[in-house]
Image: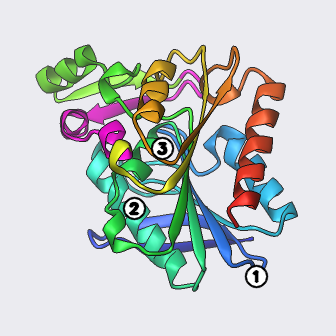
Amino acid sequence: MRKVSFMTNDNVKVYGTLSRDGSNICVIMCHGIRAGKEEHGNFTKLAEELNKEKIDNFRFDFRGHGESKEDFLKMNIAGAIKDLETSIEYISKLKYKKIILLGASFGAGIISLIDYNKYENISNLILWYPCIVYENTDVFSKENVEEAINNSYFETKSMKTGKVFKFSKEFMIQTLKYKPSENLKENKLNKLFIHGDLDINTMYEDTRKCVNESINSKFITIKNGTHGFFDNKEHFERVMSETIKYIRKNK
């Protein structure tokens, strides 16, 4: 495992952690908003399991998160897409036969939005508790977008860490433009969705509807599962087990 960094085409430095064991597949992990490349420990644990399976993996911080030196106010959806696409280009240079993208919450929305015509080696998508219909989430609701438009930003506190975050007007307006769920319906790659049916941050019903209208999609419901599964160890262990099983099958 080693720390790496590289620059995007808009001159933002991306920081990540790469685990290599010589496999022909790499899993790229994209974290949720206000989290970081460890996804509050979920990605740390997944990386440990992938390492046991000798499956290479890479996790990185979106701009404004984790080790990033960028101000969170400069974070937006278009910038996050650039961070991911630059990460894919960096990993692709390592000559992997297959790349699997795994997104959690906001990160799941971002993996839905990239231009897949540019990449031939991405084989599968995995979406954990995905944020794919922005207006139906706790952060990007219509009321919060209106507040950002009126006040130049929307301010909220992370329930997980207690840290205060200011979402720019530009960021919030972009949630009206980008439609991850619609992109997924047109995406022909094999996809695995995992969502808890008691999630109040990103809507379980939005995920179920998207899966029903998408091809090559598998849906796993975590009964009584909440956002991130942080409150139930058994729930997250099942998420890990199903994820590893899916990756093994698609190596």
Residue 173 vs residue 184, the one in the foreground: 184
Quarter of the figure with the N terminus: bottom right
> What residue span does the magenta drawing correspond to?
159-184
Residue 166 is inside the magenta segment: yes
Q: Which residue is mark 1?
A: 22
Residue at 70 percent of width and 17 percent of height? 223
The kind of residue tagged 3 is Ala
Q: Is residue 97 left or right of residue 74?
A: right
* Residue 75 appears in the figure: no
Residue 4 vs residue 96, the one in the foreground: 96
Residue 110 location (% of width, % of height): 40, 48
Q: How is the image coloured?
A: rainbow
The picture quadrant where one finds residue 86 is bottom left
* Residue 134 appears in the figure: yes
Residue 237 vs residue 39, the one in the foreground: 237
Mark closest to the chain's N terminus, 1 or 2? 1
Q: Which residue is mark 2?
A: 83
Residue at 36 percent of width and 53 percent of height? 80
Q: Residues within 10 Å of mark 3 (few under 14, many from 20)?
A: many
The kind of residue tagged 1 is Gly
Q: Looking at the image, is 104 positioned above or below residue 136? A: below
Element type at mark 2: helix
